[in-house]
Image: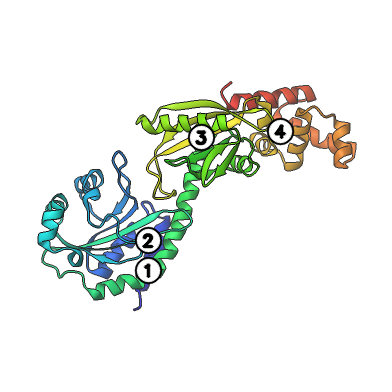
């Protein structure tokens, strides 16, 4: 069965629109002769309204759906990839008796008489996309022909949800970066309910790869030190039990070489872009407790717009090496090194090596609020 080009075009165009999916859902209603087409990007849970995109214009209906009714729907957890039709699953009498509140909701908002839907999962992010479309009282129920029409759309949908899931995850990562813009080069992780690592920034990735005090074991975050692991899990449990999004935890994580990571943790609201199973998330930030260890080439490039070569030179000066030692070890002429140093002075607003070192250390300390 051929899918209309207008529908596939709307499908991919809608991914970059605000809100996303809406123009596709409008086209889907015409394709299936339905109404109230909805894409659930994150299902509602107690205390979490989820994320729903719908052509339903009644705000009260959507709020009620998110706050309570969605959880009572027989369409809540359809088997992945199976197209379901409500009238085939349950008779009107069975729907009335087993899902009374849901049936009443359908009648009160839109006089809905039937639903068709499918749940699709993006394997990379774990996001589950729930697509739904309704038919009003007086219309024929959805049929095998309608199921075939929706089935023909599935290959296009799989590509679209994969693209959207990656965009959503990228946006989630950028939102975490924006939240810590004053703490550049600090490791950041987003953890799920059980401590599973959902998102990590490049600083955290390097630490995890080298198991430098923090590592991933069976998908979950733990520490190199068993004592630190106990403290980390206790802090996570306290954050999980406390409903306040403002609650924070701080602790010290022992590193293999004897230094410590200073860790800050806070509950944050779940977002599209992470796997479906995560009902609550925790933001974990960490940096070297001694302060100077957080000075990396990437940090210097971000703070002062240095080139990679200039950042290498600055970092080694901060670590106590002389210009002569740096020139010899890098195989550069003294003239080249001095020229780079002049450029660094200009970019950092300094004019002497001690002043440069002091300026860099002070900037690094201020990032953690010291």
Instruction: Give how far across and how far down residue 135 sits, in percent.
Output: 18, 64
- Label 3 and label 2: CA atoms lie apart by 30 Å
- Label 1 and label 4: CA atoms lie apart by 53 Å
Instruction: Give how far across and how far down residue 248 sits, in percent.
Output: 45, 27
Instruction: Give how far across and how far down residue 312 sits, in percent.
Output: 76, 38
Mark sitting earlier along the chain (2/1): 2
Q: Quadrant of residue 183 in the image? A: top right
Q: Judge left or right: residue 105 versus residue 162.
A: left
- Label 2 and label 4: CA atoms lie apart by 51 Å
Q: Are marks 2 and 1 in contact (CB under 8 Å)?
A: yes
Mark sitting earlier along the chain (2/4): 2
Q: Quadrant of residue 202 in the image? A: top right
Q: Label 4, on which residue? A: 347
Secondary structure at badge 4 equals: helix
Instruction: Give how far across and how far down residue 237 sits, in percent.
Output: 42, 32
Mark sitting earlier along the chain (1/3): 1
Q: Label 3, on which residue? A: 284
Residue 285 shows in this picture = yes
Query: Relative to the observer, which residue lies in front, 265 or 163?
Result: 265
Mark sitting earlier along the chain (3/4): 3
- Label 1 and label 3: CA atoms lie apart by 37 Å
Secondary structure at badge 1 equals: helix
Q: Label 1, on which residue? A: 154
Secondary structure at badge 3 equals: strand
Image quarter where the N terminus lies is: bottom left
Mark sitting earlier along the chain (3/2): 2
Q: Judge left or right: residue 339 versus residue 158.
A: right
Name the mark on residue 120: 2
């Amino acid at each position: 069965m051929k899918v209309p080009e207008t529908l596939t075009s709307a499908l991919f165009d809608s991914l970059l629109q605000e809100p996303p999916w809406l123009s596709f859902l409008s086209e889907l209603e015409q394709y299936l002769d339905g109404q109230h087409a909805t894409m659930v990007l994150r299902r509602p849970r107690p205390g979490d309204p989820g994320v729903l995109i719908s052509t339903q214009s009644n705000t009260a209906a959507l709020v009620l759906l998110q706050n309570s009714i969605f959880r009572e729907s027989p369409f809540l957890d359809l088997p992945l990839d199976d197209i379901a039709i409500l009238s085939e699953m349950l008779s009107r009498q069975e729907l009335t008796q087993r899902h009374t509140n849901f049936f009443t909701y359908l009648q009160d908002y839109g006089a809905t008489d039937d639903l068709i839907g499918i749940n699709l999962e993006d394997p990379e992010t774990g996001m589950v996309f729930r697509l739904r479309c309704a038919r009003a009282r007086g219309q024929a129920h959805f049929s095998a022909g309608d199921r075939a029409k929706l089935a023909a759309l599935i290959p296009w949908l799989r590509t679209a949800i994969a693209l959207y899931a990656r965009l959503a995850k990228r946006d989630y990562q950028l939102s975490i970066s924006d939240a810590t813009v004053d703490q550049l080069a600090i490791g950041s992780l987003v953890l799920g309910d059980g401590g599973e690592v959902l998102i990590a920034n490049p600083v955290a990735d390097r630490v995890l790869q080298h198991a430098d005090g923090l590592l991933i074991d069976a998908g979950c975050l733990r520490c190199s030190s068993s004592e630190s692991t106990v403290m980390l899990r206790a802090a996570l449990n306290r954050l999980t039990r406390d409903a306040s999004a403002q609650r924070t935890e701080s602790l010290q994580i022992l590193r293999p070489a004897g230094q410590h990571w200073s860790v800050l943790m806070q509950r944050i609201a779940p977002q599209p872009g992470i796997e479906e199973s995560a009902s609550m998330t925790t933001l974990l930030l960490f940096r070297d407790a001694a302060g100077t260890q957080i000075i990396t080439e990437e940090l210097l490039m971000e703070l002062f717009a240095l080139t990679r070569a200039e950042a290498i030179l600055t970092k080694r000066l901060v670590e106590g090496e002389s210009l002569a030692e740096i020139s010899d070890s890098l195989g550069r002429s003294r003239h080249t090194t001095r020229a780079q140093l002049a450029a660094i002075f200009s970019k950092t607003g300094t004019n002497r090596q001690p002043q440069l070192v002091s300026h860099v250390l002070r900037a690094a300390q201020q990032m953690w609020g010291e």
